Amino acid sequence: MALRIRLKRFGAKKQPTYRLVIADSRAARDGKFVESVGFYNPLPEPAIIQVDMERTREWLRRGAQPSESVRQVLTRAGLWEQISGKSPATPAGAAAEPAKDGATSSAAQPAPAAGSANGAAEGA
């Protein structure tokens, strides 16, 4: 059984709140879970995040893997370093080297310019 720390959605339509739960990776998003270890409400400014740090650390020691969204929420709150003892990981889609390469960034810039020209032609 592969365990994940992930978000379970609660709340009314267009008013989401989430619980951080430990669940089998094969279970439905809002289905069966092993334990609830926190709460996340993204609507207020700033967002409300409550996490039971000790229980989360214990589940990480047991091999539970956080979902990408849980890791992002905890990183934004500044809790990921405290819980995991690790620095935040680079997102899976981003690579550090291409961002530093000047040739790559200049090659990516013509695409938006072409899109702007098309937008101007449609408006005329």
Image (cartoon, rainbow, N blue to C red):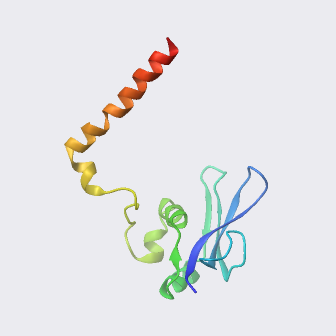
Q: Quadrant of the N terminus?
A: bottom right
Please tell me whether residue 81 is drawn above or below residue 58 in the rendered image. above
Residue 97 versus residue 1 in the image, above or below: above
Identified at 67% across, 64% down, the residue is 18
Closer to the camera in the image, 123 or 100: 123
Residue 34: x, y in percent?
67, 83
Q: Count of labels shown? A: 0
* Residue beneath the point at 52% across and 65% down: 74
Residue 101 point in image, percent of width and height? 21, 47
- Please name the residue shown 50% across and 65% down the image: 68
Residue at the extreme top? 124
Q: Is residue 41 left or right of residue 72?
A: right
Q: Residue furthest right?
A: 12
Could you tell whether 64 is left or right of 116 in the image? Answer: right
Residue 33 is situated, as x and y percent measured from the top left of the image, at 69, 79
Q: Residue 37 location, x and y as percent?
A: 63, 77
**Residue situated in front as seen by the camera: 80 or 106:** 106
Residue 36, by quadrant, is bottom right
Residue closest to the eye, 2 or 68: 2
